[in-house]
Image (tube, grey):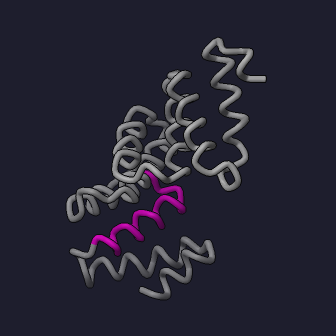
Amino acid sequence: MNAGKKYLDQGDAKNALAIYKEAVVLVPNDPGVHLNLANCYLLSDAGAEAVREADEVLSLEPNSAAAYFIKGSAYLRLLNPKESVKALENSRRIDPGVTATFFQLGMARMGLEQWNEAVSAFQEGIRLDSNRLHSAARFLLAQSLLRAGRKEEAQ
């Protein structure tokens, strides 16, 4: 499994996926293996499989913020912002200090045209870590402010 982690760290989801598929057969009740497999699927643009594995993690470890984050991110890629928001809100509730959760949550809220909620999510993510949050957060914040009719704040 260390090889799988090494591949993931190198951004090689394809080889990591092969290793974690084998690992999950050997240790089917290990939430960490399922979480890594879910992440591999997410990085391989296999959203439905990522959701399935994230759900498996949650059946083994119901308070896994990381599993909810992967599930929400996968739903976002599957163009299902409603389910994305549900999962990402759970992730945020469990671990409220993760900036990436707020970025994804803001994008999901934009997908639902919930502009003020998107604004709040982007603002919170930027507030938590203004130096490391994805650079698109400020742009998307401005877009959400404009669509919410808050033009002065967007400038």
Left-right relation of 38 to 130: left
Residue 8 spot, x, y in % from top left: 54, 75
Q: In percent of the image, x 48 and y 52: which residue is there? A: 97
Q: Along the line of sight, which residue is nearer the eye, 46 or 74?
A: 74
Q: Quadrant of the C terminus?
A: top right
Q: In percent of the image, x 36 and y 58: which residue is there? A: 67
Q: Looking at the image, can residue 49 be seen?
A: no
From this viewpoint, which residue is outermost toward the front? Answer: 127
Compared with 87, 69 (above or below) is below
Compared with 1, 147 (above or below) is above
Q: Along the line of sight, which residue is nearer the eye, 26 or 152?
A: 152
Left-right relation of 8 to 96: right
Compared with 113, 34 (above or below) is below
Left-right relation of 145 to 110: right
Residue 32 spot, x, y in % from top left: 34, 73
How would you classify the magenta stretch by its main secondary structure? helix
Compared with 145, 50 (above or below) is below
Residue 126 spot, x, y in % from top left: 63, 43
From this viewpoint, which residue is outermost toward the top? Answer: 149
Q: In percent of the image, x 42 and y 70: which residue is there? A: 36
From this viewpoint, which residue is outermost toward the right? Answer: 155
Q: Looking at the image, can residue 151 be seen?
A: yes
Residue 46 spot, x, y in % from top left: 47, 56
Q: Quadrant of the N terminus?
A: bottom left
Q: Along the line of sight, which residue is nearer the eye, 24 or 90?
A: 90
Residue extent of the magenta highlight = 31-48
